[in-house]
């Protein structure tokens, strides 16, 4: 049987992720697929990088945690967005694929347009983390 956790435990785990990454982590938008693990070196071309808002995720509720505020960057290179990394300093805490649209599945980040031009403003349209073990 797989592990199952209470909603309170799932919410606490999600809130701990935000606490660990800090109040102003860096969001990187990169080309290609994400590396094998968050501990693996960066891959792909860095298209954009910038600080997230100080309260970048909403409080966990129902075992889910969504982005808070506006997540906006300006592109520094051109290419097709493929994956993201959320870092504190050199440490990657979260990574995952980028999808095009206004909704994202668990661990995905949505951009309205994944074809990025140099100096283009980029706004993340959706991002949600869901804790497993329901």
Image (cartoon, rainbow, N blue to C red):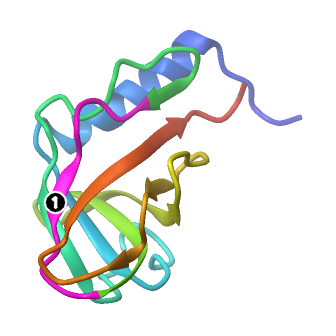
Left or right of 46 in this view: 96: right
Up/down of 74 relative to 107, above or below: below
Which quarter of the picture shows residue 48?
Answer: bottom left
Residue 72 on the magenta span: yes
Give above or below for 79 relative to 15.
Answer: below
> Along the line of sight, which residue is nearer the eye, 2 or 58?
58
Q: Give the position of the N terminus as an image quadrant.
A: top right
Residue 15 rendering spot, x and y as whole percentages: 36, 25
Residue 8: x %, y % from top left: 53, 10
The 10 Å Cα crowd at callout 1, few under 14, some 14 to 19, many 20 or more, is: many
Residues rendered magenta in the picture: 66-78
| Place of residue 108 in the rendered image (x, y in percent of width and height, measured from the top left) | 52, 55
Dividing the picture into quadrants, the one containing residue 27 is bottom left
Going by the image, does 54 lie left or right of 95?
left
Q: Secondary structure at mark 1?
A: strand
Instruction: Count numbered badges in the picture.
Output: 1
Q: Quadrant of residue 12?
A: top left
- Residue at point 11%, 33% (across, down): 54
The residue at the point 23 percent across, 82 percent down is 46
* Majority SS type along the magenta span: loop
Residue at 59% in and 45% down: 106
Q: From the image, which quarter does the C terminus lie in?
A: top right
Residue at image location 13% in from the left, 38% down from the top: 53
The residue to which callout 1 is attached is 73
């Amino acid at each position: 049987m797989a592990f199952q956790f209470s909603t309170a435990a799932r919410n606490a785990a999600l809130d701990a992720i935000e606490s660990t990454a800090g109040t102003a982590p860096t969001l990187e938008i990169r080309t290609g697929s994400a590396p094998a693990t968050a501990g693996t070196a960066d891959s792909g071309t860095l298209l954009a990088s910038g600080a997230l808002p100080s309260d970048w995720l909403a409080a966990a509720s129902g075992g889910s945690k969504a982005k808070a505020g506006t997540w906006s960057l300006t592109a520094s290179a051109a290419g097709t967005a493929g994956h993201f990394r959320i870092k504190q300093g050199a440490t990657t805490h979260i990574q995952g694929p980028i999808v095009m649209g206004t909704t994202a599945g668990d661990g995905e980040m949505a951009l309205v347009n994944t074809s990025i031009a140099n100096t283009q403003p980029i706004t993340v349209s959706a991002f949600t983390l869901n804790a497993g073990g329901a």
